[in-house]
Amino acid sequence: MKKQYCTYEISYDLKELGFDDPCMAVYYPNSVWYQYSKKLGIRNSEKGDKTFICTSPMWQQSIDFIREKYNYDIQICFKHQDGTKGDGKKSDYYDINIYQLSGGEIWKIYNFSEISNDFKYAREFSILKAIEIIKIIKHK
């Protein structure tokens, strides 16, 4: 079940960016992950359990948070090339597009090509890149 949740690094960064949605899992000191069973969701701001460091959102929760709070839309695109690189080999991979939205329109596009042929790696990469972009923009 843990594979459905964000890594410690992403979870902590999201907390720093204001993520406070209910989650079903938390990280304790030393990056120890625990699926929370005491209730149907715990928030970073909860006062009852001060021993955890941050909540552990599911992957989709993190993507939704980035879009809803910071107006960055993450797109993970599967690509298939049938020997078009000149080597005659087929290749499958994922491209990442991060769109900065403003007033319902795309304001800026960040593109990362041929990230990986592994979707889970591409998903984690895209969230980390979006967080990196948000941190840079916030500190300008």
Image (cartoon, rainbow, N blue to C red):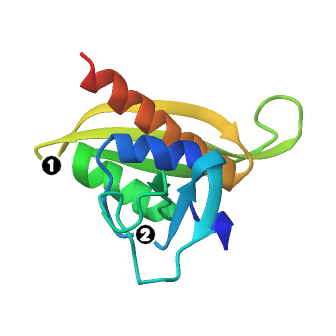
Residue 79 in sight in this render: no
Apparent side of residue 94 relative to residue 139 in the rendered image (left or right)? right
Q: Looking at the image, tell me whether mark 2 or mark 1 is earlier in sequence order.
A: 2
- Kindly identify which residue carries mark 1: 104
The image shows residue 58, relative to residue 32, as above or below, that is: below
Tell me residue 124's x, y (percent): 59, 47
- Which mark is on residue 23? 2
Q: In the rendered image, which quarter is residue 125 located in?
A: top right
Q: Secondary structure at mark 2?
A: loop
The image shows residue 22, relative to residue 7, as above or below, that is: below
Residue at 76% across, 36% down: 84
In the rendered image, the residue lying farthest to the right is: 88
In the rendered image, the residue lying farthest to the top is: 140
Tell me residue 105's x, y (percent): 18, 43
The image shows residue 14, relative to residue 55, as above or below, that is: above
Gap between marks 2 and 1 measured at Cα = 29 Å
Residue at 29% across, 47% down: 18
Callout 2 amino acid: Cys
Apparent side of residue 56 relative to residue 138 in the rendered image (left or right)? right
- Which mark is on residue 50? none
Label 2 crowding class (10 Å Cα cut-off): few <14, some 14-19, many 20+? many
Q: Nearer the viewer, residue 128 or 126?
A: 128
Q: Nearer the viewer, residue 109 or 85?
A: 109
Tell me residue 55's x, y (percent): 46, 59
Residue at 42% across, 84% down: 39
Q: In the rendered image, which quarter is residue 110 located in?
A: top left
Q: Secondary structure at mark 1?
A: loop
Apparent side of residue 76 relative to residue 84 in the rendered image (left or right)? left
Answer whether labels 2 and 1 touch (C-beta < 8 Å).
no
